[in-house]
Image: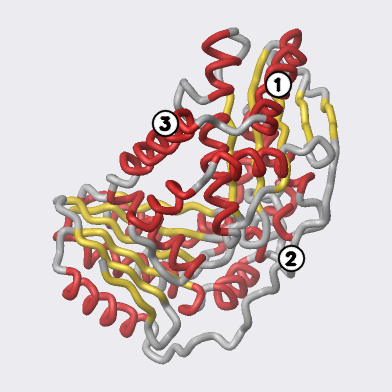
Amino acid sequence: MKYGSLPSGLRYAVRRSHSSVAYCSISIKCGTRDEEGFHNGIAHFVEHTLFKGTSRKSASVISSYLDRLGGELNAYTTKEEIVLHATVLKEDLPKAASLLFEIVTDATFPEKEIETEKGVVIDEINSYKDSPADDIYDRFEQMLFEDHPLSGLILGTASSVKRITHDELIRFVREKFVPSAMAFTVVADEDESRMERDVFRLVGRFFPDAVPSQKEEGNFLAPRPVHFDKTVNKRNHQVNCILGSYAPSLYCHDDRVAAVLLANILGGPASNSILNAVLREKNGLVYGVECSYTQYKDSGIMAISFGCDNENLEKCMKLINREIAALQEQPLSDRRLKAAKKQFLGQLAISGDNGETQCLSMGKSLLSYNRLSEDSENRSRIEAVTAQQIMETARSIFASDRLSRLVYL
């Protein structure tokens, strides 16, 4: 694995795999939190419309460019990033990488395509009304980060999306899509030194005169503490509930690792996670329950979410509170903690054995920390977490005076 940064400020990483499939991505350090001065939802809308044409390729050419090679072109937007990524056979990697750079440096945002895509995005926004499990998380996060840049909805609202203009899209890209805010990553079965040289040539071609941006990184802004317990009558067949609080940020390294492990122990994807075992497997009260932990640069959020029949809501809450209290009051035994670490490390190894996951993770790490960590380093950090840390993290995040709840009836 090789990584570094170029004179333009663009960060890069290349990693050799042993597969006929290659992956590449461009991660851009701007997202919904960076929309000040623009209409809410523009970051996500840019992600949608980047593919609608460049000065050299039409939307139809772009959409079929990798498809006819058997490849895939995708993108997504978060509160802090826009990411474009491609999957192709390794011999087609140069075409995929060149296409990604062409899109981020030469998107033209045709007026006709903008209007068409508004309809698509507004339909996506409206579809959330039929998916309360998705909508409730967005609303919970919006309420928890009230008056903070993280409160913005990734999709925006129907009214805000309607007001986005061609000139606004161009301005957003010119301001935000600068090399010093980008990371380019590759995972392919190629010599790493050769891939590195190819990256240098590619960046030199698309950013021939670029110099590092003089714009300073925005100040970290801790959210103003908010505490609420709100019920909204949605007239749904099922009750949806989410409860949670602030959690360590990306840069609270030791606390962050303990929080990751806590979330997995409490409500990770495995059926033996505490809440899955108690609410679903033992008592049959829910179809699914999850404890998620999302990390941002200046804060984080840990939340427990589930859906159940109306008459089971308080039963679920009682059991959840009981299990949280147990984690707060009694350290995990050595045997239980060791098993939890082994399970989590196994999950990481399995998910990390995917080239696309590796490629995207590398981009995230470069943008966040300006470096990549070895698997051994991550393993050491997880192994170093103590039962006392897990207990203290549970006490901090799930303190009764910090815990907020949102219920959709």
Amino acid at circle 3: Ala
Q: Position of residue 87 (x, y in %)?
A: 28, 52
Left or right position of 23 against 106: left
**In which quadrant will I find the C terminus?**
top right
Left or right position of 354 against 217: left
Q: Position of residue 354 (x, y in %)?
A: 29, 46
Residue 234, by quadrant, is top right
Secondary structure at numbered mark 3: helix
Tell how many labels.
3
Answer whether labels 1 and 3 touch (C-beta < 8 Å).
no
Distance (Cα) linking label 2 and label 3: 37 Å
Q: Going from the N terminus, do you reach mark 2 or mark 3 first?
A: 2
- Give the colour scheme of this rendering: secondary structure
In front of the other: 22 or 305 = 305
In front of the other: 211 or 91 = 211
In front of the other: 209 or 273 = 273
Distance (Cα) linking label 1 and label 3: 22 Å
Secondary structure at numbered mark 2: loop
Q: Going from the N terminus, do you reach mark 1 or mark 3 first?
A: 1
Distance (Cα) linking label 1 and label 2: 33 Å
Secondary structure at numbered mark 1: helix
Which residue is denoted by mark 2 in the rendering? 221
Which residue is denoted by mark 3 in the rendering? 339
Amino acid at circle 1: Arg
Q: Who's the residue at 36% across and 65% down the image? A: 100
Left or right position of 52 against 65: right
Which residue is denoted by mark 1 in the rendering? 322
Q: Who's the residue at 68% across and 64% down the image? A: 35
Q: Is residue 43 visible in the rendered structure shown here?
A: no
Q: Is residue 281 visible in the rendered structure shown here?
A: yes
Amino acid at circle 2: Leu
